[in-house]
């Protein structure tokens, strides 16, 4: 097969959803072009924004920083990195080493914060206490709590995360199956709320296998290990089903995403004003009820001590 764009013989990828064959150079260019185009199309970033990339050292967030550094080099944006240490054995330690190496190479300032310092507990310690929920719930909610709080302190205009197409569609299907309509309407290219720094997802329309191919094609330095808690997650089960479905229906991820965009518009109108955020009575962060999600979870497992949050106010 020849590259659909330049005719070269060195094809490295076949896009089954579009029929294209691409060589390494054309593939790298195509990914960068698509991401930069989506940034424009969805107005993810504006000139002079200070963008904080949530970098774990994994393939997705490393791809985000690699592509956003093109905009930083052109002095269009200011780029910094936030890395969270959730306290997941060696897995997280290695990830942080990869993330730090990338920041050093690109000359981007990195800020590292840990669960241990903020909450006085790590994910490993929470899970060892046999809590009622799965690791990903604690990990996701507590990580977002730190990122939101620190991004504001760092004066960031945007927080860029590494969510790819597969992640987004998994989230749509998961929330749909769980009947979680409030979460369903929050899924989108940006998560805007007056009370949080806006989150953006530059890779939202890039399939996971293309993110992996990009990392390999560019020889990026990434941590490829899987989180030890992922095996048991609902997300992983949904991901396996969607990957299987995509074998016979290669456009299914894009059609689910587009369908969700239409549903979201309709639902947003319907539910407008239903989830007004106020300040959490313990930590002051935005909350839908008296306590925010992070404080609710910590309270549930007996970890909401006064000093934990008073340190962080
Ligand atoms: Fe869920 Fe690591 S805690 S993937
Ligand atoms: Zn709180």
Image: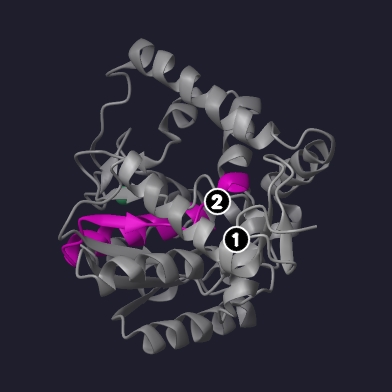
Query: Which of 4 and 102 lies nearest the eye of the viewer?
Result: 4
The quarter of the picture where residue 115 lies is bottom left
Query: Which of 94 and 49 lies nearest the eye of the viewer?
Result: 49
Residue 156 within the magenta-colored segment of the rendering = yes
Residue drawn at x 25%, y 53% is: 283
Q: Identify the residue at the far front of this view.
A: 7
| Local SS, label 1 | helix
The quarter of the picture where residue 70 lies is bottom left
**First to last magenta residue range:** 139-167
The residue singled out by tag 2 in the image is 164
Q: Quadrant of the C terminus?
A: bottom left
Q: Main secondary structure of the magenta part?
A: helix
Q: Give the CA separation, mark 1 to mark 2.
A: 8 Å
Left or right of residue 24, residue 101 in this image: left
Q: Earlier in the sequence, mark 1 or mark 2?
A: 2
The residue singled out by tag 1 in the image is 211
Answer whether labels 1 and 2 touch (C-beta < 8 Å): yes
Residue drawn at x 50%, y 46% is: 204
Q: Quadrant of the N terminus?
A: bottom right
Residue drawn at x 27%, y 74% is: 73
Q: Position of residue 42 (x, y in %)?
A: 34, 39
Is 119 located above or below residue 235 in the figure?
below
């Amino acid at each position: 097969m020849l590259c659909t764009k330049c005719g070269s013989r060195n094809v490295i990828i076949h896009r089954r959803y579009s029929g294209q064959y691409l060589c390494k150079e054309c593939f790298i260019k195509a990914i960068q072009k698509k991401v930069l185009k989506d940034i424009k199309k969805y107005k993810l970033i504006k000139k002079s924004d200070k963008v904080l990339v949530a970098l774990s050292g994994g393939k997705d967030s490393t791809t985000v920083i690699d592509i956003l550094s093109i905009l930083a080099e052109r002095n269009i944006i200011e780029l910094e990195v936030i890395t969270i240490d959730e306290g997941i054995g060696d897995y997280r330690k290695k990830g942080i080493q990869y993330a730090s190496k990338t920041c050093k190479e690109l000359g981007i300032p990195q800020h590292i914060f840990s669960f241990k310092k903020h909450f006085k507990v790590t994910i490993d310690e929470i899970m060892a206490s046999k809590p009622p929920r799965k690791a990903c719930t604690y990990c996701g909610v507590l990580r977002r709590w730190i990122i939101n709080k620190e991004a504001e302190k760092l004066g960031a205009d945007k927080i860029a995360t590494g969510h790819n197409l597969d992640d987004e569609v998994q989230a749509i299907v998961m929330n749909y199956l769980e009947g979680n309509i409030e979460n369903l309407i929050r899924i989108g290219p940006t998560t805007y709320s007056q009370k949080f720094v806006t989150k953006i997802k530059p890779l939202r329309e890039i399939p996971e296998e293309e993110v992996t191919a990009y990392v390999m094609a560019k020889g990026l330095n990434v941590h490829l290990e899987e989180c030890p808690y992922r095996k048991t997650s609902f997300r992983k089960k949904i991901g396996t089903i969607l990957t299987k479905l995509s074998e016979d229906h290669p456009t299914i991820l894009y059609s689910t995403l587009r369908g969700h965009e239409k549903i979201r518009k309709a639902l947003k109108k319907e539910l407008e004003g239903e989830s007004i955020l106020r300040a959490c009575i313990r930590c002051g962060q935005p909350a839908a009820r008296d306590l925010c999600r992070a404080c609710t979870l910590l309270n549930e497992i007996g970890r909401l001590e006064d000093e934990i949050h008073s340190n962080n106010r």
